[in-house]
């Protein structure tokens, strides 16, 4: 009788241990599944927001070539039209010229690989309207871009957005860096356009799977590495690049 009771206690104890083990495993599986779902949802959400800027008929897209890249800047404006946007990486600013008609507002979605810095983990901008400091609101931000809303009066001719990199330990300013990844905000210009815009041959960029060479006329081209020797044999490319 005593042996039976002891055996039952052992079985009961092992059963509880097994149940606890299963519960722990279930909790871990639920946690891992939740993290997996979050990892899919949030990037998809950010991508959806970005696509809304480009697909939303209320937004126009300004095309801005700068050095090796062409940037695409979604914006929505009332009361005026944008005549031009100029990126100046020496001064770390974006200068917007308006064709004015009345009081209005500008919502501009700025690619972070075009103009960006971080000071104490917070982005810092200054906005000048006709060379007077003005107010603005940051209405959206994600890993790719941020959107500013700027109100202006009927005499506004210029809006200048400046990186304020003032702190005890200034952070580097990201300006005109672009990328060769697939992004709706920028694309790499063809090598000849890069060269014609003043980029030296040493600084011309190619996509990751291509290599820079010089053609027979001295102009740059980006080709696959395995075809370089064939192009040289045919006289299409020069040996000295």
Image (cartoon, rainbow, N blue to C red):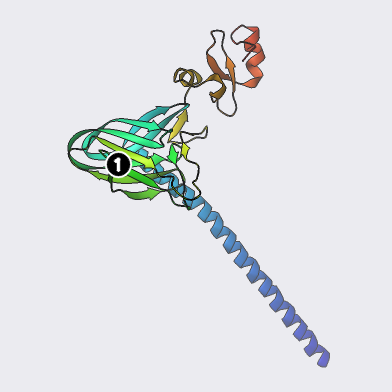
- 110 to 1, vertically: above or below: above
Image quarter in which the C terminus is found: top right
Please state if 195 lies on the left or on the right of 237 as rendered. left
Does the image show residue 58?
no
- 235 to 30, vertically: above or below: above
Q: How many marks?
A: 1
Quadrant for residue 29, please give it.
bottom right
- Determine the residue positioned at 46% across, 44% down: 117
Q: Which residue is most to the right?
A: 3
Image x and y of residue 207, in percent? 55, 27
Quadrant for residue 83, please give it.
top left
- 48 to 84, vertically: above or below: below
Q: Which residue is most to the bottom?
A: 1
Please state if 225 lies on the left or on the right of 199 as rendered. right
- Determine the residue positioned at 72% across, 82% down: 12
- Determine the residue positioned at 29% across, 38% down: 159
- Determine the residue positioned at 48% across, 53% down: 120
Does the image show residue 176?
yes
Quadrant for residue 63, please give it.
top left
Of residues 37 and 13, the one drawn nearer to the viewer in this rendering: 37
How would you rate the neighbour count of disc 1 (Cα within 10 Å): few for under 14, some for 14-19, many for 20 or more? some
Q: Which residue is most to the front?
A: 168
- 156 to 192, vertically: above or below: below
Disc 1 target residue: 128
Image x and y of residue 65, in percent? 40, 27
Q: Secondary structure at mark 1?
A: strand
Please state if 101 lies on the left or on the right of 194 as rendered. left
Image quarter in which the N terminus is found: bottom right
Please state if 82 lies on the left or on the right of 22 as rendered. left
Of residues 200 and 142, the one drawn nearer to the viewer in this rendering: 200
Image x and y of residue 116, in percent? 44, 42
């Amino acid at each position: 009788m005593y042996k039976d009771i002891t055996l039952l206690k052992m079985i009961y104890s092992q059963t509880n241990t097994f149940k606890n083990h299963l519960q722990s495993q279930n909790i871990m599986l639920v946690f891992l599944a939740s993290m997996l779902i979050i990892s899919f949802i949030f990037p998809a959400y950010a991508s959806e927001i970005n696509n809304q800027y480009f697909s939303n008929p209320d937004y126009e897209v300004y095309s801005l070539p700068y050095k090796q890249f062409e940037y695409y800047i979604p914006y929505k404006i009332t009361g005026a039209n944008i005549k031009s946007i100029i990126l100046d990486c020496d001064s770390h600013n974006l200068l917007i010229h308006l064709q004015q008609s009345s009081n209005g507002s500008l919502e501009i979605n700025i690619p972070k690989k075009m103009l960006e810095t971080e000071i104490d983990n917070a982005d810092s901008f200054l906005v000048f309207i006709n060379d007077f400091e003005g107010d603005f609101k940051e209405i959206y931000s994600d890993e790719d871009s941020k959107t500013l809303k700027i109100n202006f009066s009927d005499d506004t001719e210029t809006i200048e957005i400046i990186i304020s990199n003032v702190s005890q330990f200034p952070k580097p300013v990201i300006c005109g860096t672009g990328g060769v990844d697939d992004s709706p905000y920028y694309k790499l210009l063809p090598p000849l356009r890069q060269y014609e815009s003043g980029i030296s041959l040493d600084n011309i960029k190619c996509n990751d799977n291509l290599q820079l060479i010089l053609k027979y006329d001295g102009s740059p081209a980006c080709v696959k590495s395995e075809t370089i020797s064939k192009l040289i044999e045919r006289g299409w490319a020069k040996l000295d690049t």
